[in-house]
Amino acid sequence: KQEVTQIPAALSVPEGENLVLNCSFTDSAIYNLQWFRQDPGKGLTSLLLIQSSQREQTSGRLNASLDKSSGRSTLYIAASQPGDSATYLCAADPGENNAGNMLTFGGGTRLMVKP
Amino acid sequence: GAGVSQSPSNKVTEKGKDVELRCDPISGHTALYWYRQSLGQGLEFLIYFQGNSAPDKSGLPSDRFSAERTGGSVSTLTIQRTQQEDSAVYLCASSLRGLEETQYFGPGTRLLVL
Protein backbone atom coordinates (compact mmCIF):
# COMPACT_ATOMS: atom_id res chain seq x y z
CA LYS A 1 0.00 0.00 0.00
CA GLN A 2 1.37 3.38 -1.01
CA GLU A 3 2.28 5.75 1.82
CA VAL A 4 3.16 9.39 1.25
CA THR A 5 4.95 11.49 3.83
CA GLN A 6 5.64 15.21 3.83
CA ILE A 7 8.32 16.95 5.83
CA PRO A 8 8.22 19.38 7.50
CA ALA A 9 4.62 19.45 8.73
CA ALA A 10 4.87 23.21 9.22
CA LEU A 11 7.31 25.85 8.07
CA SER A 12 7.61 29.56 8.79
CA VAL A 13 9.97 31.74 6.75
CA PRO A 14 10.52 35.45 6.20
CA GLU A 15 9.44 36.93 2.91
CA GLY A 16 11.96 36.60 0.10
CA GLU A 17 13.49 33.32 1.19
CA ASN A 18 13.84 30.36 -1.12
CA LEU A 19 12.44 27.18 0.39
CA VAL A 20 12.07 23.46 -0.26
CA LEU A 21 9.18 21.21 0.69
CA ASN A 22 9.80 17.47 0.77
CA CYS A 23 7.59 14.56 -0.21
CA SER A 24 8.49 10.88 0.01
CA PHE A 25 6.56 7.84 -1.17
CA THR A 26 7.07 4.15 -0.43
CA ASP A 27 6.00 2.58 -3.75
CA SER A 28 8.04 3.83 -6.70
CA ALA A 29 5.55 2.38 -9.23
CA ILE A 30 3.80 5.69 -9.75
CA TYR A 31 2.41 7.17 -12.93
CA ASN A 32 2.79 10.75 -11.82
CA LEU A 33 3.36 12.90 -8.75
CA GLN A 34 1.18 15.94 -8.17
CA TRP A 35 1.55 18.99 -5.96
CA PHE A 36 -1.46 20.91 -4.73
CA ARG A 37 -2.07 24.03 -2.70
CA GLN A 38 -4.90 24.38 -0.21
CA ASP A 39 -5.93 27.70 1.26
CA PRO A 40 -7.89 27.71 4.54
CA GLY A 41 -11.52 26.77 4.02
CA LYS A 42 -11.05 26.11 0.33
CA GLY A 43 -10.50 23.18 -1.98
CA LEU A 44 -7.27 22.10 -3.60
CA THR A 45 -5.58 23.91 -6.46
CA SER A 46 -3.32 21.90 -8.71
CA LEU A 47 0.18 23.40 -8.95
CA LEU A 48 2.36 20.95 -10.84
CA LEU A 49 2.08 17.44 -12.23
CA ILE A 50 5.27 15.48 -12.95
CA GLN A 51 4.97 12.39 -15.11
CA SER A 52 7.02 9.39 -13.99
CA SER A 53 9.26 9.79 -17.03
CA GLN A 54 10.08 13.41 -16.13
CA ARG A 55 12.61 14.75 -13.64
CA GLU A 56 11.11 18.16 -13.01
CA GLN A 57 8.41 20.66 -13.87
CA THR A 58 8.46 24.42 -13.52
CA SER A 59 5.73 27.00 -13.23
CA GLY A 60 6.72 30.55 -12.42
CA ARG A 61 8.50 30.59 -9.06
CA LEU A 62 7.69 26.93 -8.46
CA ASN A 63 9.88 24.01 -9.43
CA ALA A 64 9.05 20.41 -8.60
CA SER A 65 11.49 17.54 -8.99
CA LEU A 66 10.91 13.81 -8.98
CA ASP A 67 13.31 10.98 -8.19
CA LYS A 68 11.28 7.79 -8.58
CA SER A 69 14.07 5.42 -7.63
CA SER A 70 14.54 7.05 -4.25
CA GLY A 71 10.83 7.74 -3.77
CA ARG A 72 11.22 11.46 -3.35
CA SER A 73 9.84 14.68 -4.74
CA THR A 74 10.62 18.25 -3.77
CA LEU A 75 8.77 21.48 -4.33
CA TYR A 76 11.05 24.50 -4.55
CA ILE A 77 9.55 27.95 -4.06
CA ALA A 78 11.76 30.86 -5.05
CA ALA A 79 11.55 34.33 -3.51
CA SER A 80 8.65 33.44 -1.25
CA GLN A 81 5.81 35.92 -0.74
CA PRO A 82 3.13 36.24 1.96
CA GLY A 83 0.58 35.13 -0.64
CA ASP A 84 2.34 31.77 -0.80
CA SER A 85 1.11 31.01 2.72
CA ALA A 86 -1.03 27.87 2.44
CA THR A 87 -0.88 24.13 2.96
CA TYR A 88 0.98 22.27 0.24
CA LEU A 89 0.04 18.67 -0.50
CA CYS A 90 1.75 16.13 -2.67
CA ALA A 91 -0.05 13.10 -4.07
CA ALA A 92 1.13 9.94 -5.82
CA ASP A 93 -0.93 8.64 -8.73
CA PRO A 94 -0.57 4.92 -9.45
CA GLY A 95 -2.24 5.18 -12.87
CA GLU A 96 -5.01 3.21 -14.54
CA ASN A 97 -3.16 -0.10 -14.71
CA ASN A 98 -2.32 -0.42 -11.07
CA ALA A 99 -4.57 -1.73 -8.36
CA GLY A 100 -5.91 0.85 -6.00
CA ASN A 101 -6.24 3.43 -8.72
CA MET A 102 -6.49 6.52 -6.56
CA LEU A 103 -4.36 9.44 -5.55
CA THR A 104 -2.59 8.90 -2.22
CA PHE A 105 -1.97 12.18 -0.43
CA GLY A 106 0.68 13.22 2.03
CA GLY A 107 -0.28 14.99 5.23
CA GLY A 108 0.74 18.37 3.86
CA THR A 109 3.18 21.09 4.81
CA ARG A 110 1.63 24.22 6.32
CA LEU A 111 3.67 27.18 5.06
CA MET A 112 3.64 30.64 6.60
CA VAL A 113 5.56 33.42 4.85
CA LYS A 114 5.95 36.42 7.10
CA PRO A 115 6.18 39.93 5.62
CA GLY B 1 -15.10 28.66 -17.22
CA ALA B 2 -16.80 27.59 -14.00
CA GLY B 3 -14.89 25.26 -11.75
CA VAL B 4 -16.11 22.40 -9.59
CA SER B 5 -18.87 23.50 -7.24
CA GLN B 6 -20.15 21.81 -4.11
CA SER B 7 -23.15 22.36 -1.90
CA PRO B 8 -23.82 23.00 0.83
CA SER B 9 -20.58 24.67 1.90
CA ASN B 10 -21.33 23.85 5.53
CA LYS B 11 -23.65 21.29 7.08
CA VAL B 12 -24.39 20.70 10.74
CA THR B 13 -26.45 17.64 11.56
CA GLU B 14 -27.38 15.49 14.51
CA LYS B 15 -26.00 12.03 15.02
CA GLY B 16 -28.20 9.44 13.33
CA LYS B 17 -29.53 11.71 10.60
CA ASP B 18 -28.89 11.22 6.89
CA VAL B 19 -27.08 13.87 4.83
CA GLU B 20 -26.64 14.47 1.11
CA LEU B 21 -23.70 16.34 -0.35
CA ARG B 22 -23.75 17.56 -3.92
CA CYS B 23 -20.99 18.04 -6.49
CA ASP B 24 -21.19 19.73 -9.87
CA PRO B 25 -18.07 18.88 -11.89
CA ILE B 26 -16.53 20.98 -14.62
CA SER B 27 -18.64 20.71 -17.75
CA GLY B 28 -17.31 18.02 -20.09
CA HIS B 29 -15.26 16.23 -17.43
CA THR B 30 -16.04 12.53 -17.49
CA ALA B 31 -14.24 11.57 -14.28
CA LEU B 32 -15.42 12.54 -10.80
CA TYR B 33 -13.88 11.79 -7.44
CA TRP B 34 -14.90 12.17 -3.80
CA TYR B 35 -12.35 12.59 -1.01
CA ARG B 36 -12.61 13.16 2.72
CA GLN B 37 -10.29 15.32 4.77
CA SER B 38 -10.52 14.67 8.48
CA LEU B 39 -8.61 16.55 11.13
CA GLY B 40 -5.39 14.65 11.72
CA GLN B 41 -6.18 12.07 9.03
CA GLY B 42 -5.09 13.82 5.88
CA LEU B 43 -6.93 13.44 2.61
CA GLU B 44 -8.40 10.05 1.77
CA PHE B 45 -10.03 8.74 -1.39
CA LEU B 46 -13.67 7.66 -1.18
CA ILE B 47 -15.08 6.89 -4.64
CA TYR B 48 -14.32 7.41 -8.34
CA PHE B 49 -16.73 7.64 -11.30
CA GLN B 50 -15.52 7.34 -14.89
CA GLY B 51 -18.09 7.76 -17.65
CA ASN B 52 -20.58 4.91 -17.68
CA SER B 53 -18.27 2.42 -15.97
CA ALA B 54 -19.10 0.96 -12.59
CA PRO B 55 -17.70 3.29 -9.91
CA ASP B 56 -14.65 2.39 -7.87
CA LYS B 57 -16.07 2.31 -4.34
CA SER B 58 -12.97 0.88 -2.71
CA GLY B 59 -12.44 3.92 -0.49
CA LEU B 60 -15.88 4.10 1.11
CA PRO B 61 -15.38 3.55 4.86
CA SER B 62 -18.67 1.76 5.55
CA ASP B 63 -21.98 0.77 3.99
CA ARG B 64 -23.50 3.94 5.44
CA PHE B 65 -21.73 5.80 2.62
CA SER B 66 -23.02 5.74 -0.94
CA ALA B 67 -22.72 7.92 -4.00
CA GLU B 68 -24.34 8.21 -7.35
CA ARG B 69 -23.75 10.20 -10.47
CA THR B 70 -26.75 11.01 -12.58
CA GLY B 71 -26.44 11.60 -16.30
CA GLY B 72 -22.69 11.50 -16.10
CA SER B 73 -22.61 14.92 -14.48
CA VAL B 74 -23.84 15.86 -11.00
CA SER B 75 -22.91 13.54 -8.14
CA THR B 76 -24.46 13.09 -4.71
CA LEU B 77 -22.65 11.58 -1.74
CA THR B 78 -25.06 10.25 0.86
CA ILE B 79 -24.15 9.39 4.43
CA GLN B 80 -26.82 7.50 6.33
CA ARG B 81 -27.17 7.41 10.12
CA THR B 82 -24.31 9.87 10.54
CA GLN B 83 -21.77 9.37 13.32
CA GLN B 84 -19.54 11.95 14.98
CA GLU B 85 -16.49 10.43 13.29
CA ASP B 86 -18.04 11.36 9.92
CA SER B 87 -17.27 15.02 10.70
CA ALA B 88 -14.83 16.16 8.05
CA VAL B 89 -14.46 18.22 4.90
CA TYR B 90 -15.75 16.33 1.89
CA LEU B 91 -14.00 17.32 -1.33
CA CYS B 92 -15.10 16.59 -4.86
CA ALA B 93 -12.82 16.71 -7.89
CA SER B 94 -13.18 16.14 -11.61
CA SER B 95 -10.81 15.50 -14.49
CA LEU B 96 -11.30 15.51 -18.23
CA ARG B 97 -10.99 11.82 -18.96
CA GLY B 98 -9.87 10.00 -15.86
CA LEU B 99 -6.93 9.02 -13.77
CA GLU B 100 -3.43 10.11 -14.66
CA GLU B 101 -4.67 13.64 -15.30
CA THR B 102 -4.84 16.80 -13.26
CA GLN B 103 -7.79 16.77 -10.93
CA TYR B 104 -9.64 20.01 -10.25
CA PHE B 105 -11.07 20.31 -6.78
CA GLY B 106 -14.18 22.00 -5.48
CA PRO B 107 -14.20 24.09 -2.28
CA GLY B 108 -15.54 21.23 -0.19
CA THR B 109 -18.45 20.70 2.17
CA ARG B 110 -17.63 21.00 5.86
CA LEU B 111 -19.76 18.46 7.74
CA LEU B 112 -20.17 18.60 11.50
CA VAL B 113 -22.07 15.81 13.22
CA LEU B 114 -23.15 16.72 16.74
Image: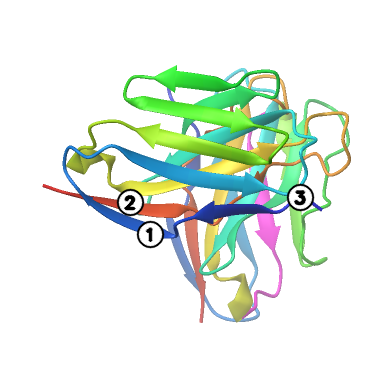
Cα–Cα gap, marks 1 and 3:
23 Å
Question: In the visual, does A22 lie left or right of B80?
Answer: left
Residue type highlighted by circle 3 = Gln
Report the label total: 3
Sequence-wise, the earlier of marks 1 and 3 is 3
Residue under the point 62% across and 76% down: B85
Q: Nearer the viewer, residue A98 or B51?
A: A98
Residue under the point 59% across and 79% down: B84
Q: Label 3 crowding class (10 Å Cα cut-off): few <14, some 14-19, many 20+?
A: some
Percent x, y of residue B103 = 59, 31
Magenta residue span: B73-83
Q: Nearer the viewer, residue B76 or B63?
A: B63
> Does the magenta-highlighted stretch encompass residue B102?
no
Percent x, y of residue A42 = 39, 47
Q: Secondary structure at mark 2?
A: strand
Question: In the visual, does A75 lie left or right of B50?
Answer: left
Sequence-wise, the earlier of marks 1 and 2 is 1
Q: Secondary structure at mark 1?
A: strand
Percent x, y of residue B19 = 61, 64
Residue that mark 3 sits on = A2
Q: Label 1 crowding class (10 Å Cα cut-off): few <14, some 14-19, many 20+?
A: some
Q: Are marks 1 and 2 in contact (CB under 8 Å)?
A: yes
Q: Chain of mark 1?
A: A
Residue that mark 2 sits on = A111
> Which quadrant holds the N terminus of chain B?
top left
Residue B23 location, quadrant: top right
Cα–Cα gap, marks 3 and 2:
25 Å
Residue that mark 1 sits on = A10
